Image (cartoon, grey):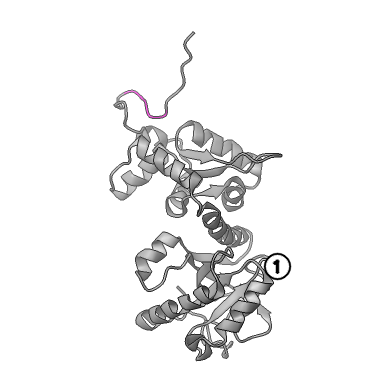
């Protein structure tokens, strides 16, 4: 007995091996297209992250994602976890990757190329780091869906690398607007894989970038424990750019599990934690100075 399966790449008038992007256009909703653009920029999200970004409940999100999966628009993977199951990780499928390529005028990837990307991403030791970075921004974007605040800028590590070159390699860049005030920052998402002295050494690159581009963004460092945070602040106190007020650095540790927009950020040289929207954008000793937009 032969079982046939629908193939999202095939339709009348479409050659075998060509993704059926034209056929998908009438079925891709504006939310689907927005999600594909996010996946093109940020690579991977969990089901829960996608729900927070674009859906009102996880059941609706799962149903829509499974439909897109069946049509080859998205792909998914997860590790075996006992007991229970790990949340699915979602990324671009062949049709989704082709849609983005046609939109940008870049070469359309082959199915094998997209499959290799999915396999490499699923096996990457940097996957937890990437999901952590994306989770940081998703929390802010989800809050902005239901409040007057706005995540005005959200750059991936890849876009930061294109802009910053070899001076420094941020994990992300963002700008948060609340009550008419905008705070811009670079993100360093630390998963306790780097010693404090190496994290502090990165501040030289940020100081050089800010001097060259006349920027005054904050540098936000997400730590894992309060002990790591304390040690980092001890070292930051003697860093020339931080001590002279050329660079504003603020940290939050995993022991402070509140929302990243909340009262979690400790500016180097200070003793009181601040909300993201209240971070000074100039000198650490001048909290009244207005913030600079990205």
Q: Is residue 183 visible?
A: no
Nearest the viewer among 286 and 204 is: 204
205 and 39: which is toward the camera: 205
Position of 59 with respect to 8 (left or right) is right
In the rendered view, would you say 264 is above or below 191? below
Q: Position of residue 189 (x, y in %)?
A: 54, 65
Q: Main secondary structure of the magenta part?
A: loop
Query: Could you tell me which secondary element the residue under label 1 belongs to?
Result: loop
Q: Position of residue 44 (x, y in %)?
A: 50, 49
Task: Indicate yes or no whether the magenta region holds residue 10.
Answer: yes
The C terminus: image quadrant: bottom left
Question: Picture quarter containing residue 156?
Answer: bottom left
In the figure, is residue 59 to the left or right of 123?
right
Looking at the image, which is closer to me, 288 or 249?
A: 249
**Left/right of residue 97 with respect to residue 181 in the rendered view:** left
Q: Is residue 178 visible?
A: yes
Give percent across and percent down for residue 176.
Answer: 54, 70
Q: Is residue 88 left or right of residue 101?
A: right
Label 1, on which residue?
A: 255
Q: Position of residue 124 (x, y in %)?
A: 48, 49
Which span of residues is magenta-colored?
8-12
Residue at x-position 65% and y-position 78% = 230
Residue at 35% of width from left, 81% of height from top?
Answer: 212
Whether residue 67 appears in magenta in the rendering, the answer is: no
């Amino acid at each position: 007995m032969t079982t046939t399966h629908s193939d999202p790449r095939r339709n009348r008038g479409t050659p075998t091996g060509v993704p059926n992007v034209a056929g998908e256009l009438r079925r891709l909703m504006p939310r689907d297209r927005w999600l594909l653009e996010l996946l093109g920029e940020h690579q991977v999200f969990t089901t829960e992250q996608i729900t927070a970004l674009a859906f009102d409940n996880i059941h609706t999100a799962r149903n829509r994602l499974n439909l897109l999966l069946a049509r080859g628009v998205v792909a998914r993977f997860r590790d075996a976890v006992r007991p229970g199951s790990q949340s699915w990780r979602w990324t671009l499928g062949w049709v989704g990757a082709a849609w983005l390529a046609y939109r940008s005028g870049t070469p359309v990837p082959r199915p094998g190329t997209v499959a290799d990307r999915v396999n490499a991403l699923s096996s990457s030791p940097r996957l937890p780091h990437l999901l952590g970075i994306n989770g940081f921004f998703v929390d802010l974007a989800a809050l902005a869906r239901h409040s007057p605040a706005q995540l005005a800028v959200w750059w991936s590590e890849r876009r930061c690398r294109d802009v910053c070159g070899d001076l420094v390699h941020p994990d992300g860049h963002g700008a948060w607007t609340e009550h008419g005030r905008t705070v811009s920052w670079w993100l360093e998402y630390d998963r306790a894989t780097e010693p404090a002295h190496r994290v502090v050494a990165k501040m030289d690159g940020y100081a050089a970038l800010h001097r060259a581009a006349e920027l005054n963004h904050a540098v936000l460092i997400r730590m894992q424990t309060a002990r790591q945070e304390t040690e980092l602040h001890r070292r930051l106190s003697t860093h020339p750019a931080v001590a002279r007020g050329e660079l504003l650095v603020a940290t939050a540790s995993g022991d402070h599990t509140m929302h990243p927009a909340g009262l979690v950020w400790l500016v180097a040289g200070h003793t009181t934690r601040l909300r993201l929207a209240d971070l000074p954008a100039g000198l650490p000793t001048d909290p009244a100075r207005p913030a600079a937009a990205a």
